Image (cartoon, grey):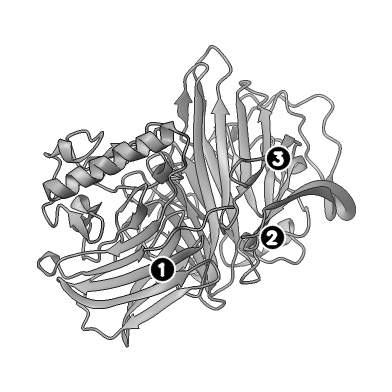
Amino acid sequence: MDEVKLTRGKQVIPTYVPKKAHELPMFFENKPYQGASGRVYPIPYCDGISDEKTDVEYEVYTLENEYIKTQVVPALGGKILRGLDKVGGYDFLYYNEVVKPALVGLAGPWISGGIEFNWPQHHRPTTFMPLEAVEERNPDGSRTVWTGEVEPFDRMKAMAGITVDPGRSYIRAKVRIYNRTPFPQRFMWWANLAVPVNNNYRTVFPPDCEWVNDHDRRAVLEWPIAKGVYQTARPFDFGKGTNLSHYDAVRVPSSYLISQGQSDMDFVSGYDVGLGKGIATVANHHLAPGKKMWHWGIGDFGDMWCSNLTDKNGPYIELMTGVFTDNQPDFTWIAPYETKEFEQYWYPVREIGEIKNATIDAAVNVERRKDGLYLGFNVTGVFTGCTVVVTDGGKELLREKADLSPEQIYQKTIAADIADSDLCLLAHLGDFLGQLLAALLGRSREVQTDGLAVINGVDAHIAGQDGLADGAQQSAVPRGDGQGAGLADSHRSHLLDGRGRTIVIHGHLVQNAGVGTACAHGLQLALQMLDCALHLVFECLGVAAHCPCLLFVINSHQPRKGVWHILLSEAGQYAQPS
């Protein structure tokens, strides 16, 4: 495993320099902006951009390991400039090689590309202003670049720690928001991710998403096949059926957002079916319910904005994830002196097609093809001795071993008589022994509501379908709430909701106390309780409980509309930094 490298240096980027800001900031107290207040004071306001580009030297922080490379530019609002898949040779973030502002921002200049962290409103008021930056070397070998500010309006503080971990193919953002005032304050946080697109690009929303809406929920459409008129500020008639996931299907500037409760999954993805490459973005949907796609639209208007924002890097769309809010300009509250913390992840996917689910450890695609059932896995770390198991109604169709890493993709097509049902992945569950990614293949959302995944050491089942835990057996779930197989991380308050809905493993929850598992038998329950007790002991002794196994499950039963079990588990030791 290679060491994570962090370098700070000067990089020349051709720049269209904004004109000098007004000496006296304009007082637009009643001007609306992005559905919120457009007041700019005390930020200087600029209303002009140079027509000629100049070479400008920026301080750039570069983080990389053997799999990925990313760059952070504090002078440009702390933007993540680039995300490069070193294995696939692909920029999975939109890499704009020129700084070409347009007058989109609250204070004027705004640039496209990379990842922009929008707070305390959209777009970030200081998006084209410099932030402070500091480097951090972490005990686990990861390296972090922290950028942050005390925002100029309400004097709250926010920091984003852009991190690359050893042996991992993801970019991780550790975010802290602190209300340093004695008053309740409102804010939003959206990670504005730009991805490079062409007519082969697909927006991949979670398969449990059935409809999308505009800002303020002014208009609603079915997803992915839109029908009829989208009654937005720029209405458009999609006719009897248009696949909105296709880049070339969107003809006018449009936003498509997923409302909270419409998806119980943790990911948004984009995939270029021509190149066979794309991106997965992952965040705990209990904290980060917001999912959005923004598109400039195919046509003269979109082409104009493409030329306004870049010289040669072509079009892009935005795949955003919102924390604590699911719409724009919706805000959330932060109490006096309260600190909020959360994490967001981005990593490349390759060759497996449009994914159906993703965690921080892996992305999975399952789909029917002419020659059978296709399975594909991309993982974000080195996992040795994996076992792939596929069952159909209790009948085992496949069991085989595999060693997986970001360089080694698992793909398999099983010749099988597959029922005519929609694919839908649902639940994740993990304990310190491993991690489980579960999925349902069914025809409707009703199948998902009781899809609680369960590990019992060797086999995997779905609680609710197998009747293992329906919420009445709180004793079977450490820290459960009596409403379902729920559990909470005692250190980070990452809530697994415990109401018979999705169970999601987030961050390094598998290394923290409070992870329990619902079990069908007393002996299995005792063993799981013992596991948790031992983990608590290890944690108190300061011993890291690393994950020795990785599990992926896609599960259903023939009586429940015909689905298949798919299990990927790691029997060996998860590779850890030396």
Q: Specify whether residue 284 is in view.
A: no
Q: Nearer the viewer, residue 127 or 138?
A: 138
Q: Which mark is residue 295?
A: none
Is tag 2's residue or tag 3's residue first in the polypeptide sequence? Answer: 3
Q: Residue at x 12, y 46 (%)?
A: 522
**Mark 1 and mark 3 in contact (Cβ < 8 Å)?**
no
Q: Which residue is mark 1?
A: 385
Q: Position of residue 199 (x, y in %)?
A: 55, 74
Q: Position of residue 81 (x, y in %)?
A: 70, 52
x and y percentages locating residue 73 in the rendered image: 74, 46
Q: Which residue is mark 2?
A: 95
Quarter of the picture holding the N terminus: bottom right
**Helix, strand or loop for disc 3:** loop
Q: Residues within 10 Å of mark 1 (few under 14, many from 20)?
A: some
**Mark earlier in primary sequence (1, 2):** 2
Counting residues from the start of the chain, the first of labels 3 and 1 encountered is: 3
Mark 3 crowd level (few <14, some 14–19, many ≥20, 10 Å Cα): many
Relative height, residue 374 to residue 537 (above, below): below
Which residue is tagged 3?
77
Residue 557 occupies which quadrant of the picture?
bottom left
Dot in front, 3 or 1: 1
Disc 2, SS: loop
Please tell me whether residue 382 is drawn above or below residue 114 in the rendered image.
Answer: below
Horizontal side of 145 relative to 560 (left or right) equals right
Q: Amino acid at mark 2?
A: Tyr
